[in-house]
Image (tube, grey):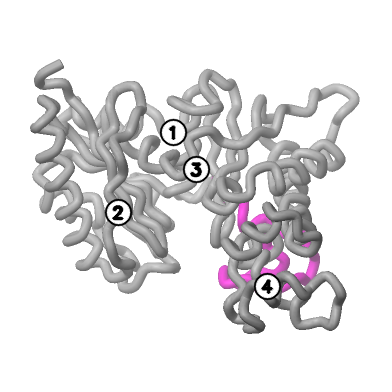
């Protein structure tokens, strides 16, 4: 339809910047990826502005009007989603008025959301978790994030930091985390943990470490997540064991979340899960069921692979932004869906 209102979703991570036009049914256009890694604040504003300008031109050519922009950011945000508190993998981002700065650049309403929260909203509105009463999602990538939707509301918490599943403490006096605590889940259930485990195994004179080390050209530092996952898909026992161990940790952590939230469905997504599929989700599902509490009276909810893949965050952010595009004050619209 000529003049149809659409939104643009942006996924800003520690290693990628991707954007797409998203229609009212949650269908993204082919994503446009920024060709270089963006870390500094000013660089991000410039890059997002350029991507959005190109996508607006494309939308106009299709008779569509871009009414707002939503950004899924790998960052800790304030409760009102106006400012970035801190972004661990982005330089110079502490206490930045990101929403206002970007909106001024673009001349459009802008909504900012944490990447995992945006992903669970995408799955709730247009993916595998539609109409679920209580939806919980873990995103497994370099680290591990989480998102919660209850009764159609995105749960962000009193200070805006709800759903940080990666910082559940699962090992007493365990490995030291960058957050200052010990034994956090993401030290055992993340892409970083996977690589650490695989490199340690390859450094030992074990019979099954040969293929992994050979695939890395004999150099431990070349062992990374994609290499491990590819080898696991080919059937390598060590690589498969590493992914299964990671999945078990994910399931164990999610069982703790389920004790508190009583979800009707649990989803697992994120870049690593998208690549490895059931090699991670299968062990997570089994461990979740084994660790589930109050099983005598509470059914174990289904644990499924998220449906939207890498597009979940930008679809969720764009869907949140679609409400902002209909109002003059974006912060008012955000209150419709966030608790």
The quarter in which the N terminus is drawn is: top left
Residues at marks 3 and 2, CA–CA distance in whole angstroms: 31 Å
Q: Determine whether the residue tagged by mark 4 lies in a helix, strand or loop.
A: helix
> Which residue was labeled with disc 4?
196
User: In terms of secondary structure, where does tag 3 sit?
Assistant: loop
Q: Earlier in the sequence, mark 2 or mark 4?
A: 2
The answer to the question of whether label 3 and label 1 lie on touching residues, with beta carbons closer than 8 A, is no
Could you tell me how far apart the alpha carbons at marks 2 and 1 are, in whole angstroms? 19 Å
**Among the two numbered marks 3 and 1 on one chain, the one whose residue lies closer to the N terminus:** 1
Which callout, 4 or 3, points to the residue nearer the camera? 4
Report the magenta residues as a range. Answer: 163-185
Residue plotted at (61% across, 56% down): 166
Label 2: element kind: strand
Work out how far the residue at label 4 is from the one at label 1, CA to CA, in angstroms: 31 Å
Q: Position of residue 216 (x, y in %)?
A: 62, 76
Tell me whether the residue at label 3 lies in contact with that at label 2, contact meaning CB atoms closer than 8 angstroms. Answer: no
Q: Nearer the viewer, mark 3 or mark 2?
A: 2
Residue 108 located left or right of residue 239: left
Q: Residue at x 17, y 25 (%)?
A: 5
Q: Label 1: which residue?
A: 122
């Amino acid at each position: 339809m000529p003049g149809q209102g659409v939104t643009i979703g942006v996924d800003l991570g520690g290693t990628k910047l991707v954007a797409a036009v998203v229609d009212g049914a949650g269908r993204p256009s082919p994503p446009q990826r920024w060709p270089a890694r963006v870390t500094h604040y000013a660089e991000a504003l410039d890059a997002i502005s350029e991507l959005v300008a190109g996508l607006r031109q494309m939308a106009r050519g299709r008779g569509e009007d871009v009414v707002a922009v939503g950004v899924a950011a790998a960052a800790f945000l304030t409760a009102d989603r106006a400012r970035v508190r801190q972004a661990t993998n982005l330089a110079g981002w502490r206490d930045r008025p990101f929403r206002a700065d970007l909106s001024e650049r673009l001349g459009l309403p802008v909504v900012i959301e944490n990447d995992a929260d945006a992903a669970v909203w995408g799955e709730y509105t247009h993916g595998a978790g539609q109409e679920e009463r209580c939806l919980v999602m873990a995103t497994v990538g370099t680290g591990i994030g989480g998102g919660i939707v209850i009764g159609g509301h995105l749960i962000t918490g009193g200070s805006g930091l709800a759903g940080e599943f990666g910082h559940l403490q699962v090992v007493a006096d365990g490995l030291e985390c960058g957050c200052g605590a010990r034994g956090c889940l993401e030290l055992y259930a993340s892409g970083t943990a996977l690589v650490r485990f695989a490199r340690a195994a390859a450094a030992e004179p074990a019979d099954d470490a040969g293929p992994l080390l050979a695939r890395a050209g004999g150099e431990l530092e070349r062992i990374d997540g994609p290499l491990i996952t590819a080898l696991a898909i080919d059937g390598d026992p060590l690589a498969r064991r590493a992914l299964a161990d990671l999945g078990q940790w994910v399931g164990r952590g999610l069982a703790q979340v389920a004790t508190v939230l009583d979800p009707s469905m649990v989803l697992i997504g994120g870049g690593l899960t998208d690549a490895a599929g059931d090699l991670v989700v299968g062990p997570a599902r089994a461990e979740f069921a084994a660790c589930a509490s109050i099983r005598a009276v509470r059914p174990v909810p289904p644990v499924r692979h998220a449906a939207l893949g890498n597009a979940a965050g930008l679809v969720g952010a764009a869907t949140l932004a679609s409400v902002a595009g209909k109002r003059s004050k974006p912060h008012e619209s955000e209150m419709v869906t966030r608790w």
